[in-house]
Image (tube, rainbow, N blue to C red):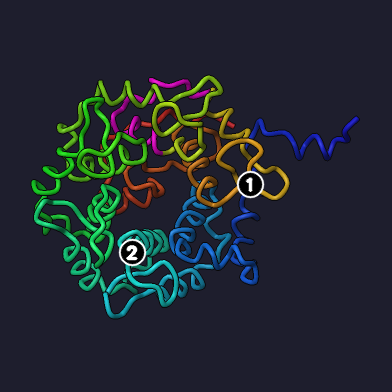
Amino acid sequence: MANATTDAASDTSTLAIPVHVSYIQKLGESQDDLMYHLTSHLRLNAVYWGLTALCVMKHKEALEREQLIEFVMSCWDEKAGAFGAHPRHDAHILPTLSGIQILVMLDALDRLDAERVISFIFSLQSPTGSFSGDRFGETDTRFCYCAVSALSLLGVLDRLDKDRVVGYIRRCKNFDGGYGSDVGGESHASQVFTCVGALAILDRLDEVDSETLAWWLSERQLPNGGLNGRPEKLEDVCYSFWVLSSLSILRKMTWIDGSALERFILSAQDMEAGGIADRPGDMPDVWHTLFGVAGLSLLGYPGLEDLDPVYCMPTDVIERRGLRKAWLALPRREM
């Protein structure tokens, strides 16, 4: 018979906040591991994922503020005027948004040469309205969202030709109401978020076929409660955010079984080492940890901070900047 300690370590009916906080704190301690270096292209993004998860779990102080700021600024690409994913990496719009988000959450945006970043972002827009990720020219609706979100956080959205961006997103819409990575791309839940999120920031949700899209998003739920990103694919914890964020923005959170999804997210926790995996039994990582916690917050899980689904940042941070949109999550339940 298992003892009480073993039973507690395997009980996934509640969110194990202390072990997840510890897991995030230890992520930077394994710099001698090969995996640490193999994932250097995601490092600044990972810092954003970890910090945001800690904020939602009400443990923002678990990472030392000045060390975080120092690392963010060490990723600055002086030639481009934006952030790379790791020191001495070339600038890209994905880590640039992460760097801005971190500095905003840490109330340290004054450390940023904002005009250079703004120039970098505008240099990536094509005449079609799309954005590329860097100077090499790959386009993706993710990059469109990054540009719109970053410019909004920097308070210069008025400089953007909004109609041109909206026109590009419109061309990425499919018959099922969803959006792909580019014009003609298959609908995918994460791309749906990038397009719906960008349209929300631009105050152009009139472009979305809300009923059709909400139906398509609700169809992403599988019998085990988890969500997938497109038809005939496996469930994955990260879609707990990608799907729920869009449903929250569309104010249709009740179109899925929230209780079943909550149980699925909690079942993917590593109760000993900490962290949340893509699905039960797999290795946890900080990406799925954030998006699992984010999904739980939108579902009204008790004891968590509110998460803004448009920006994937703490709601109070977004409200202080006067940027909140008319999204609707489930009510926060009592402990």
* Percent of width and height locating residue 25: 61, 60
* Percent of width and height locating residue 40: 49, 66
**What amino acid is at disc 2?**
Thr
Mark toward the start of the polypeptide (2 vs 1):
2
Residue under label 1, please give it. Answer: 283
Q: Residue at x 27, y 64 (%)?
A: 134
Q: Which class describes the residues within 10 Å of circle 1: few (<14), some (14-19), or many (20+)?
A: some
Report, in whole angstroms, how far the alpha carbon at label 2 lies from the one at label 1.
28 Å
Q: Which class describes the residues within 10 Å of circle 2: few (<14), some (14-19), or many (20+)?
A: many
In what quadrant of the picture does the N terminus appear?
A: top right
* Percent of width and height locating residue 104: 36, 61
Q: Quadrant of residue 138?
A: bottom left
Q: What is the secondary structure assignment of the residue under circle 1?
A: loop
Q: Residue at x 66, y 38 (%)?
A: 281
Determine if the magenta segment contains residue 244: yes
- Does the CB distance between marks 2 and 1 fall below 8 Å? no
Q: Residue at x 23, y 58 (%)?
A: 132
Span highlighted in magenta in the image: 242-259
Determine if the magenta segment contains residue 121: no
Q: What is the secondary structure assignment of the residue under circle 2?
A: helix
In this rendering, is residue 197 above or below 140?
Answer: above
Residue under label 2, please give it. Answer: 96
The main secondary structure of the magenta stretch is helix
Q: Nearer the viewer, residue 333 or 278?
A: 278
Q: Residue at x 48, y 24 (%)?
A: 258
In what quadrant of the picture does the C terminus appear?
A: top right
Q: Which tag is nearer the camera, tag 2 or tag 1?
A: 1
Numbered label attached to residue 303: none
In this rendering, is residue 24 above or below 218?
Answer: below
